[in-house]
Image (cartoon, helix red, strand yellow):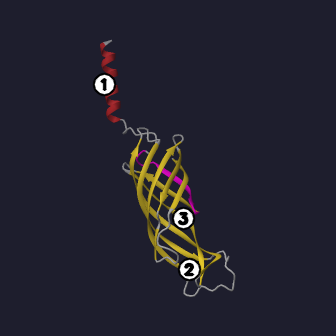
Amino acid sequence: MKEIRRYVIVAMALALLLAPQAMAQRTMRGQMFLDLSGHYPVGGAVSVGQYRLPGYWMAGIEELRMREYLHIGDAVDNLTLDIWHTKLQGGYMYRLVSNRSRSISMYAGGMGWIAAESVDPLKKLPDDIVLPGLPKHKFVFGVTPMVETEFFLGNHFAVVLGGRLPLAFLSNIRLATVQARAGFRFAF
């Protein structure tokens, strides 16, 4: 009986020594994810990323519409000018706090991006309105500081809510745009 107990103890010790590193069920190091999100006022993004120990990296594409009222002379007309950004972006988010199971985590970080900026691509302005000196297409770049909270509803599916402040350099419309973000994340 003592010999069997000794074999069991040796087998358990070898199993513990040779076992791979144990990790959490959610947001474990090396776990990939797909992120689909919508942005307020109007926009959306598709991203892929990977969780690391202090946070996660992500890269993707985004389409964003910004709208401004047209100023003709000293009056503000009812017409609006739409400017769209089609972005390639990538960045890193650091985990600030989370509960033990990581079913709820709060992140802060940012993204860098380059974009193609298009002025009135859907041709909503009447033909008699001429915008002198405003190119129809140009390249812009920028950074986006972000904060977000991730709520896992299971082992692989999460809802993500957050806020962002994209800073667009060389843009035709404005430097900063405050945005809200809501999305779904599938970790695999």
Measured along the vertical axis of the image, is residue 137 above or below residue 21?
A: below
Q: CA distance from mark 2 to mark 3?
A: 17 Å
N-term-proximal mark, 2 vs 1: 1
| Amino acid type shown at disc 1 | Val
Q: Nearer the viewer, residue 185 or 18?
A: 185
Boundaries of the magenta span: 28-42
How far is mark 1 from mark 3, CA to CA?
55 Å
The secondary structure type at the circle numbered 3 is strand
Q: Which mark is residue 137?
A: 2
Query: What residue sits 38% from the left and 38% below the top?
Result: 22
Q: Residue furthest top?
A: 1
Q: Which mark is residue 52?
A: none
Sequence-first tag of 2 and 3: 3
Badge 3 crowding class, 10 Å Cα cut-off, few under 14, some 14 to 19, many 20 or more, is many
Q: How many marks?
A: 3
Q: Which mark is residue 10?
A: 1
Left or right relative to 99: residue 115:
right
Q: Are marks 2 and 1 in contact (CB under 8 Å)?
A: no
Q: Secondary structure at mark 2?
A: strand
In what element is the residue under mark 1?
A: helix
